[in-house]
Structure formats: structure tokens, C-alpha cells
Amino acid sequence: MRTLVIGDIHSGLRALKQVFERAQVTTADRLIFLGDYVDGWSEAVETVDFLSELDETHQCIFLRGNHDELCLEWLSNDEINEVWLQHGGQATFDSYSNDIDASDLHIMFYEGLKNYFIDEQNRLYLHAGFTNLKGVDHEYSTKTFYWDRTLWEMALSLDQDLSIDSPYYPKRLVHYPEIYIGHTPVTRMGKTTPQKAANVWNIDTGAAFKGPLSVIDVDTKEVWQSDPVYLLYPGENGRN
């Protein structure tokens, strides 16, 4: 069984289908999605429909992203968050407006998302990060799991030759041999492939913007990517 991790999709269903074909995904694979399923491209409803159906045939773990939480708040309370609309939410709003019957079923999908997952080898998967020095089980606020950027910033700032046995190695990193996140696009660093810093792997390769959608095999580190997602949605802007 392969364990495949999928980066931030942002409603780019065409990219997801394409990269699944390239990775030759089967029902024998375990699929771990790092969150941010919506907000960006035009197929928010179709993306969540696809993921819900995929969950019936494949071994799926769906983690919660900040954009998924913002969408849930809107669907549940019918309150418009202007900042959300400006950061990809408008495309999601439009998608649901064209299919109002989808909202009730999708609320159940969003409510069922996990904040984090730890596998049999103690590898940690979550959308953004955590701050507690004792690990995720001791985190004070669940929102940190899908909003934090300090974990990635800290990993990038480390001397990459620093040993985990060093007294200067950050305490919150020592609990897990590997940590897989999304949330902060590596395109901000001028990269378009998954990046590793310390023991943290960032799989968000900017699918919401000008980058591709990425899938990584956590055991072999083989990577598959879609075309740059904007090429699959001509005439759309994605997230600016």
C-alpha cells in the first residue's frame, strides 16, 4: 500500500483528476489530503462531490484547511466574510449559488474533516502547523492546525545541518520523524515542487495561483504533478 499525500486543491478538480492519472492511483493506496479543497477555481461543488464519492471507494483521510473552515462558516451561518470572498471565496460562493442543493451534504463533509493525522510510523499530517512544544495533542487552540505559518517559517530558518540531538533543535519538531503540511505555497520561494526543511515537507505547490497540484509518496518521495492549474481553467483568475 502506498501512502500518497495531496497538496492544496483549491477547487482545481481538473488538476486533481490529471495528477491522479499520472500517479496511477488505485484503491490499494491510502490518500491523505492536506486541506483547502475550495476557494480558487470554479469547481468547488464538483470538487467536494468528487472527494465524497472517492471516500466511498478509496482509503481517504481528509484534513481541515483554513479555507474549508471559512466555507463551512458561510454555509452554516449564511454570513458573508468579505475577506474570504477576496481570497478565493468568491469562486466558491458562485459555485454553490449555481447548485444550492449541494450545501447540506457538503456541510457534513466539512464538519467531518480531521485537524491532524498521525500514521503508524508516527509521521504527522496537518494543513498548517502547531505551536506546542509537547506536540499536537497538547495544542491550546484547534485553529492553529489550519492557520499557523510559524512551523514552516521555523523549519526554513533552521541550519539544515543541525542534528535532531542538538539542544538547539526546536522541541516541537522532535516528536515526529516527518511532518507533512500545505497552507503556505512554496511558489513564494520561487519553487514549484514539494520542499523539505528540517523534517517538515511542504506539499502546497501553488495550485491556487500559477503552480501545479502535487502528490507525494511518503515512503519513496516520488512526486507527481498536474500541469500548472491555471492552464486547465482558461479565462479564470484563480486566487490573485
Image (cartoon, rainbow, N blue to C red):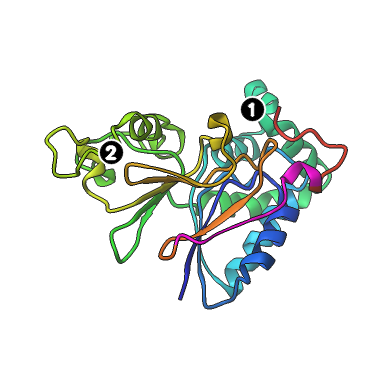
- Does the CB distance between marks 2 and 1 fall below 8 Å? no
Residue type at numbered disc 1: Trp
| Residue occupying image coordinates x 76% and y 36% | 91
Mark 1 surroundings within 10 Å by alpha-carbon count, few (fewer than 14), some (14 through 19), many (20 or more)? some
Q: Which residue is mark 1?
A: 84
Please determine whether, in this image, residue 137 is positioned above or below residue 81.
below
Asked whether 224 falls inside the magenta stretch, the response is yes
211 sits left or right of 154 in the view: right
Quadrant of res 133: top left
State the residue in front, 184 or 52.
184
Please determine whether, in this image, residue 186 is positioned above or below residue 112.
above
Which corner quadrant holds the C terminus? Answer: top right
* Percent of width and height locating residue 190: 57, 32
Asked whether 95 falls inside the magenta stretch, the response is no
Q: Counting residues from the N terminus, which is met first, the one under dot 2 or under dot 1?
A: 1
Residue type at numbered disc 2: Glu
For the record, the magenta segment spans 221-231
Quadrant of res 79: top right
Residue 139's disc is: 2
> What is the secondary structure assignment of the residue under circle 2?
loop
- Marks 2 and 1, how far apart at CA: 25 Å
